[in-house]
Image (tube, grey):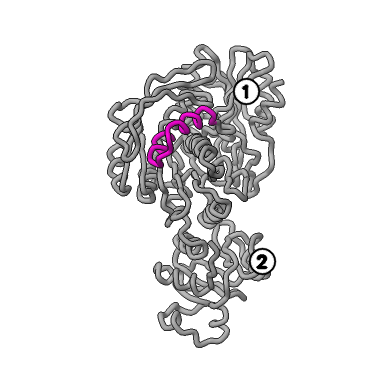
Amino acid sequence: MERTVTVHDFIDALEKAGLLVAINGEPSLSDLMESYTDPLLDEKVKTVVSGVTFNSREAKEGSLFVVKGAHFREQYLADALDKGAACFVREVTDGSYKPSSGFGIYVRDIRKAMPVIAETFYGKLSDDLTMIGITGTKGKSTTAYFMRYIIDEYMAATGGHRSAVCSGIDNYDGVIEEESHLTTPEIMELYQHMYNALSSGIGYMTMEVSSQALKYDRVTGIEFGAGAFLNIGSDHISAIEHPDFNDYLEAKLRLFGHCRKACYNLDCEEQERIKAASADCPYVITFSQKNNNANVFGFDVRSKEGKVTFRVRGRSIDGYPDFDEEFTLGTFGTINVENALAAISLSALLGIPMEYVQSGLAKANSPGRMEVFYSEDGKRIAIVDYAHNKLSYEKFFETIKDEFPGKKMLIVFGCPGGKAFARREELGTIAGKNCTYSIITEEDYGEEDVNKICQEIAGFVEAAGGKWEIITNRVDAIKKAITMMDDDTILFLPGKGRETREKRGIQYIDTPSDADVVIEFMK
């Protein structure tokens, strides 16, 4: 896997991709590419690159530094050059080149350049690592964890290594194990995870693929051995994400063009567009709980004492035997059957024997995902989840009404700042209709006024007939809610799961997770 890559290799790759605008402020003419008459320039382009990064704190001697980000400051570039960066790459759109003491490569689109830079440095790693990509409005994290458990069962039985994962919850690649900031990492970080996985002898990596990752080229050049399209609902509509639902859906549908094999859910909306987009993938199967013509059909769903069981019939999957088997989930909630069907479909596409699929799902749990906590006397219940959009909220309340009939609901929730503005109305309305009381709080408010966000949500809670109060500190809000619980009330804590950071301003501040607060104060 060791490669020797020079500055010239990046220049050449960016030129071939049609992205190169200038080298060190000079237009990138073909004769300049082939013959460097300036001795200093010739020396620079022959420099061996030791790493690629967009984080000045990670820059080192010989690294290539990418200039990107809404919060970029020129000091970051200066810091990278002071640490010995061999060159930098930055976008130029108006024909002007910002002066710098370092050697610069200028491109017309930094987002499209980053996949070229990553692949030039690391090689096409998805040829050697089986990548599994999962997209959808809800259920990505749970499905990713289901796959993680299934593959790990398979690997344990066949002498393989624990599988890698890049999810909205955490990242693991054999070297790095960390809580994640993004649902899908930036592509250079993703390549680093893939490289680490291969270096550690890992054969599989499961990852969530967000609409932002698909729209902004974070997975360009990566091929998934198998991919899943879970569902679609209106979300992430804002000036900095997707201007409308059509843009959001189109971004999600791009997943099929990255997959060698794929599966999709017959039970979600926009079937005609999903089917049409799936033609971009060479081999596609379907899963469903409603349509028994699906390749993977789930039925006879039962839930008792926190355990979910169901039957699945699989048929007409190329290279995989037909089956009709019972499954048990190791996690709470019939809401997760849809995710399990996706995992079963992905496993069949990858040729994983059914015995490991069954045992993996029976053990699977996703930290902070539909996690149920009981008081010591077993009478009071709190549920922590990552639910953060209309579709996931609706599915949650549907599940709770089925599994805990007659219980009242108390909720602590918020909405993020600067994006997905429609959630404030959608989630506030759902909470107002389904909960006896809402405590509205922070949820990564970022650079927006947290009180303003909470007041907006409160207006929709009240309009839907709900009672509410605002406590902007999330830990204090959860503590207050716990004091309000009685034996007939379920406390719902959506949005943050087991995350241990809140985005306040442009900083991520360490905080106790929702689960940690519940464990401590439910006593």
Q: Which mark is residue 27?
A: none
Q: Is residue 449 left or right of residue 29?
A: right
Residue at (58, 42) in percent of width and height: 170
Q: Which residue is mark 1?
A: 373
The kind of residue on which mark 1 rests is Phe
Residue at (44, 32) in percent of width and height: 339
Q: What residue span does the magenta drawing correspond to?
A: 343-364
Of the residues tagged 1 and 2, which is closer to the observer? 1
The kind of residue on which mark 2 rests is Asp
Of 149 and 102, the residue lying toward us: 149
Q: Is residue 301 magenta?
A: no
Residue 122 in percent (x, y) is at 51, 61
Element at label 2: helix
Res 297 visible: no
181 up-or-down from 23: above or below = above
Residue at (29, 35) in percent of width and height: 316
What crowding class fits label 1: few (fewer than 14 Cα within 10 Å), some (14-19), or many (20 or more)?
some
Q: Which residue is mark 2?
A: 79
- Name the quarter where the C terminus is drawn: top right
Of 257 and 109, the residue lying toward us: 257
Residue 398 in percent (x, y) is at 45, 22
